[in-house]
Amino acid sequence: MPRNQFERMMFALMTVIVTVHAYVFYSLYVVNSSTLMSVTGENSVLGAVNAMGGVYMFGRNLPIWAVVITEFILAYTLEITVGSPMSFKLACKVFDPKETHPVLFETAIICATVGVMCPAMSFLAAFLYYPYYAGFNIFTLLANWIKLVCFNFPFAFFSQLFFIQPLIRTCFKAMFRRKAETAQAVKA
């Protein structure tokens, strides 16, 4: 898998691109769809978002593209600075990467990444989507954070383990195959 800093950043970029779109879709259509449609009286989520003038973030309604870009920037920064390094260290505490089968070690990294990133991104989401019109209360923020972790963790775990990471790893191997084949040819 990624062997240098550039490859790690590309792997994180590919992961975050897929993940942010999946979570925005999940948040709008699965978690908040009934609320959005009942508030606006629309019979579709997209109609409700359009009727509201966007998605509520930062105390006002923003277009979906602004929500995706904001979450992408936050998720990529968090993944590069905290998520990837910490998940690798956590996996190494349990398994020796040299002696453990690669599939098992990659699975440990995925589980550790979800364990780190889900609470962190849920906290950021609780802050971003906080109902500021009602005034700020730290206990409301913490309650919203715990609620988001409870909603997001099962989706994050299963989607990363069985869909997103296998897809990204396959695409990553295809993109960096030539580089690996060249390195093997040089060794031979």
Image (cartoon, rainbow, N blue to C red):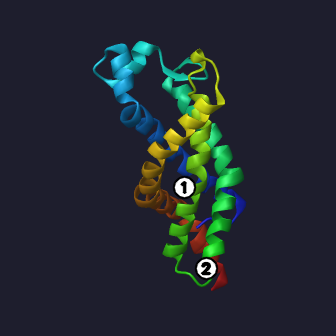
Q: Which residue is mark 2?
A: 185
Image quarter hosting the N terminus: bottom right
Residue in the image at 50% along x and 62% along y: 169
The label shown at residue 114 is: 1
Locate residue 129, reporting x and y percent.
56, 28
Asked if residue 3 lies left or right of residue 173, the reply is right
Q: Residues within 10 Å of mark 1 (few under 14, many from 20)?
A: many
Which-is-in-front pick, marks 1 and 2? 1
Residue in the image at 68% along x and 44% along y: 77
Locate residue 178, reporting x and y percent.
56, 67
Label 1 sits on a secondary structure element that is helix
State how far apart marks 1 and 2 are (Cα).
Answer: 36 Å
The label shown at residue 76 is: none
Q: Are marks 1 and 2 in contact (CB under 8 Å)?
A: no
Image quarter hosting the C terminus: bottom right
User: Which amino acid, mark 2?
Assistant: Ala
